[in-house]
Amino acid sequence: RSVLLIHGRTWSSQPVFDLRTSDDDAKRQSTLQSLADLGFHAYALDLRGFGETLRDYSEPVCGYTTPSRCVADIKCAIDWITERHKLCEIDDSSDNNMSTNIPGMESPTTINYRPALVGWSQGALVAQMYAQMYGTSTLSDLVLFGSIYDPKVIYPRKPLYDPSGALISGGPNVKKPPPPEVRNTDIDSLEDFTLPGTICDEAALCYSKLALAVDPVKGAWDELHEFNILNPALVHVPTMVLVGAQDPYTSWDAQRELFDRLGTEDKAMCVLPGCDHAAHILKARKMFVRAVAGFLLRKDEF
């Protein structure tokens, strides 16, 4: 069973999902390693302009990170993961006497080959956008973790033209100004940790050092109005809404509406007590891993 993790607005996958305070990750800070230990094929994607993925300077994104470009890249990653892990041992299954045509029994080519998608923070918006467009045909499950979805938020669209008359938004021949080169800071790297005592000093300092090393410059997000198409009713894949009980970046009303309006009855909502936005990195991170794993394995036999 495979799972793809999507990071948020500021930091790439290595500090967010593969933090290690020692070479052997003895404290199991790494979400990827923790999921792998449970038998998952765990992957994480660096979106354009983050971590090990360079900015895309081709038109129309012109060096910016846009929701639609992120969705397209996730589609490529999901297709690759699916192809890599698809259960296609038809020849092996035909060597035994078990028929795959027994009523109610799935073919070995259709069991567990679709990956799950986990999005965190703004990455949860991207994951939801992907699920609305491609989820029913490509995903097994969706986890929206610390989603900043809010139906009351309408992202404004930038003007189509700049004062000189040049097209800077909304067209195939768009000419955007160069993306800003804004340096990340020590304070930036620790802004998601808002509850005293929930993360040890060693892990926080390790996170800060790694985050600034792999993401020295802020990602340049653009075309955020593309998020305005988000509609929970259009999500038809099994979905978990997962949030820290003291997450300062989420709205309880928005989380409830997100859950209530999901277009699937196969859904769950989990609140992690004593956690803020970065629950998967805190001392209580095992609760996060168990919640995700429990949902993804909910239909498996004991």
Image: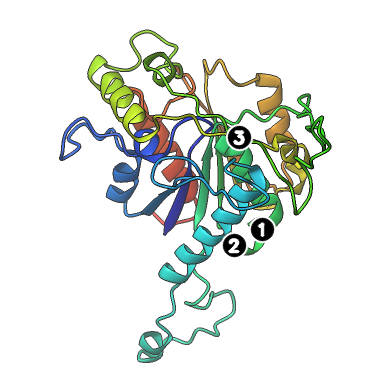
Residue located beneath label 2 in the image: 138
Label whose residue precedes the other's in the sequence (1 or 3): 1
Vertical relation: 265 (above or below) 254: below
Disc sitting over residue 221 in the figure: 3
Label whose residue precedes the other's in the sequence (3 or 2): 2
Decide which of 200, 259 is in the foreground and name it: 200
Tell me how far mark 3 sits from mark 2, CA to CA: 26 Å
| Picture residue at 70% right of the left edge, 33% below the top | 258
| Picture residue at 41% right of the left edge, 69% below the top | 84
> Element at badge 1?
helix
Image depth: mark 3 or mark 2 in front: 3
Q: Are marks 1 and 2 in contact (CB under 8 Å)?
A: yes
The image position of residue 63, as x and y in percent, is 57, 43
> Element at badge 2?
helix
Q: For the residue marked with disc 2, what is the amino acid?
A: Thr
Q: For the residue marked with disc 3, what is the amino acid?
A: Trp
The image position of residue 275, as x and y in percent, is 45, 19
Residue located beneath label 1 in the image: 134
